[in-house]
Amino acid sequence: MASPIFTRPFRRVFAANVMSDLSFNVFVHFPGFLKELGAGEALIGLIASVAVLTSVSLRPGVGQAMDRRGRLPIVRAAAVTRLAVALLFFTIGSIGPWVFVVRAVYGISTAVVFTGLFTYANDLMPPERRTQAIALYGLSGLVPGMFGAALGDVIISRFGYAGMFVAVAAFDGLAIAVISRLRPLPRTGTFVVGIGFRRLVRLRTLRSVWLLTVCFGLVFGSLQTFMRTFVDASGVGTVGLFFFAYSTTAVVLRLSLSWAPDRFGFSRILFPVVLAQALGIALLSGVDSSPRFFVAAMLAGAGHAFLFPILGRLAVERSPVEDRGSASGLYTAMIDVAVLVAAPVLGVVIEQLGYPSMFRVVAATILLSAVGFAILERRVAPALAS
């Protein structure tokens, strides 16, 4: 009989991530706030990249602390910090150093909460159903994605960006309430010092995973960073419509087909969904109507539905058991690294060549990364089989 996935601890961490990601998905409108203050796309990308840089620089220590001290103390401290910093957004009245500071600390605490909850959930997952469990856990982020951005549209239209910041803080507070109900998990065996964050980066069997993860992060980061300004510039669709179609597609596919990678093998699923995601992004380069906008979102969401759980499983299972907290941290950090590099670069591409060129660059990059993944996988196949 297959081991259950939705145990009581799993349901609690699922609920905690729902609240956390509702905050995150309302916050996707923050670039619009910066635009109102006079920031251009390149500066918006720079602000995002500075936030990610600080987050990534702290991630090795956070991952190792979770392996040594447990997941929950780190998550709880980060959640409280995030709520406190969310209230500081009300103090921003112009573009200056304070914007970078507040956005950076908020980004750090958000990343730590996300990583900690993801790692805690991984500890609960039956190994033989890990891809399916990651896919189902990912619904806790995708369901808020269906409604969070649209909720932000409504709030901003009625109450302005001050209302958005109130909503962000409220969801952060609800996340803390649920996180407080999580309980430490028993640790089996004695503590063993793992191979460390730097060696995980260089681990031969993980190079293909890191490559495709970074490029997956490039796609997601381009949408999170520039979708707000893209719809304003193009006059087609809304942020809420895009992420509703994106997330709904991913939710439906995960609910109906989350078992497929475990049953058929990840390689048979991976490349078709990469192609779907690349096609969705490419469609955005020539979008001129709401139906095409909607189809592009659905294709991109189909890629997300499978890429995140497949890559997450590979990152965890190809790492030593004692390094799984670090591996989870590194996996999510790789996505952040993509935003760090891409946000300012893509911002310059937009300013110099326009949004269509930016989306073509992103689509071509994810396709090339799939080719690189296949080449690297072929090289390590003998080691994986032994």
Image: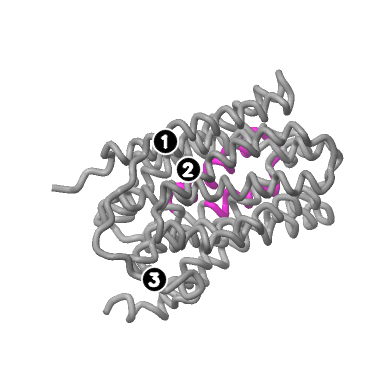
Q: Are marks 2 and 1 in contact (CB under 8 Å)?
A: yes
Earlier in the chain: of badge 2 and badge 1, it is 2
SS assignment at label 1: loop
As drawn, the label of residue 332 is: none
Magenta segment: does it hold 290? yes
Range of residues picked out in magenta: 277-306
Mark positioned earlier in the residue sequence (1 or 3) = 1
Q: Is residue 157 magenta?
A: no
* Residue 367, position as x, y percentages in the image: 56, 63
Residue drawn 55% across and 59% down? 59
Residue under pointer 3: 194
Q: Which residue is mark 2?
A: 76
Amino acid carrying label 1: it is: Ser
- Vertical placement of 144 versus 154: above or below? below
Residue 211 coordinates in the image, percent (x, y): 53, 67
Between 155 and 232, which is closer to the camera in this rendering? Answer: 155
Given the image, on which type of amino acid does mark 2 rest? Arg
Depicted 64 relative to depicted 234: above or below: below
| Image height of 375 relative to 363, above or below | below
Distance of mark 2 from mark 3, alpha carbons? 24 Å
Q: Residue furthest left?
A: 1
Measuring 57% from the left and 61% from the top, which residue is drawn there? 215
Q: Secondary structure at mark 3?
A: loop
Q: Is residue 90 left or right of residue 144?
A: right
Q: Position of residue 384 (x, y in %)?
A: 32, 75
Lateral position of residue 88 relative to residue 200, left or right = right
Residue underneath mark 1 = 180
Question: Rounded to the nearest whole Å, what is the CA distance between mark 1 and mark 3?
Answer: 29 Å
Identified at 61% across, 55% down, the residue is 55
Check the image and report above or below for 188 versus 143: below
